[in-house]
Image: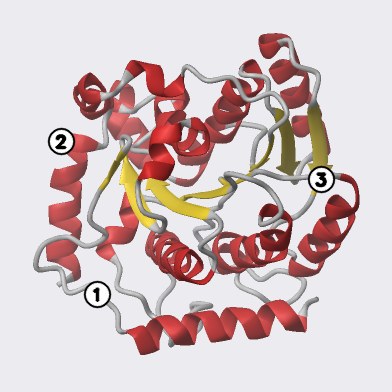
Amino acid sequence: MLLYRSAAWFAKGLREYTKSGYESASKDFVPDDLEVQVPGRSFLVTGGNSGIGKATAIEIAKRGGTVHLVCRDQNRAEGARGEIIRESGNRNIFLHIVDLSDPKAIWEFVENFKQEHTLHVLINNAGCMVNKRELTEDGLEKNFATNTLGVYVLTTALIPVLEKEHDSRVITVSSGGMLVQKLNTNDLQSERTAFNGTMVYAQNKRQQVVLTEHWARAHPAIHFSCMHPGWADTPGVRLSMPGFHASMGDRLRSAAQGADTVLWLALAPAATAQPSGLFFQDRKPVPTHLPLARTSSSPAEEEKLIEILEELAQRFK
């Protein structure tokens, strides 16, 4: 079944996820959707120092938004902040150094953040694909800690802050790769099977989709969405998937093309006309399962994921 899913997904990707796929889809975009100005609105972008995150932050800053960059590396983050200010002319760019694989650090960050700042839009963009099983200082598998638990803790902790504001939104940058994975709550930290970083990443991205659907039901005052940016030429792809990057070459989307739907979901009034909790690709909601792929999960499985994440989140609070 995994072989079928992977083959069907790759064929779909060659049609839809490439630069030509973006160019084809963009013919149906409404140009005015992103002709907005957002002074007075506050946006938090994780992983905003490169790739899709930086492209997103630049465009928000150009439209007058206050941008909070949450990054791990101080030097690279300061360089990105300077670049965003130069390109946008907007100096309301704030830097926060947080390791998103460390749940204790995330709780501490939010506790400080909410004392000083408001927040209208959270963009969960940061992620990692570690190709050998690696544990954090807390004994958590690195991909799970960053892509799933980190996203859960940050979002959960910021929901009370977001609920205070009008038109608050949470966008999570997932991946179409999740289409090859069925939710598996029996081995969240990849202890029981041979480790495959690409499949672990895809499983994490499936978990993000389940979380988005859960949050949408639990917090109707906030608009939640997740999305696939397509196959984009970013530092993360070059580092984690060098063979794929080399084979795709100039068929990959630019970081700006990858960021387009993130921006649409964060800025456009049309985005919140869509129901909360959906998965988007090129500004349109798309199915979260491939035909005949048998990747649907039961409510009990999804609830188990939430229970495990909540227990871990509270353990490290």
- Locate the N terminus by quadrant: bottom left
Query: Seen from this angle, which residue lies furthest left?
Result: 292
Mark 3 or mark 2: which comes first in sequence? 2
Front in this rendered view, residue 237 or 125: 125
Label 3 secondary element: strand
Q: Are marks 3 and 2 in contact (CB under 8 Å)?
A: no
Instruction: Identify residue for label 1.
Output: 296
Which is in the foreground here, disc 1 or disc 3? 1
Which is in the foreground here, disc 2 or disc 1? 1
Query: Horizontally, is 6 left or right of 264 in the view?
Result: left
| Residue sitting at x 45%, y 69% | 217
Label 1 secondary element: loop
Front in this rendered view, residue 102 or 317: 317
Residue 15 marker: 2
**Could you tell me the amino acid type at mark 2?**
Arg
**C-alpha gap between disc 1 and disc 3:** 37 Å
- Asked if residue 226 shows in the view, the reply is yes
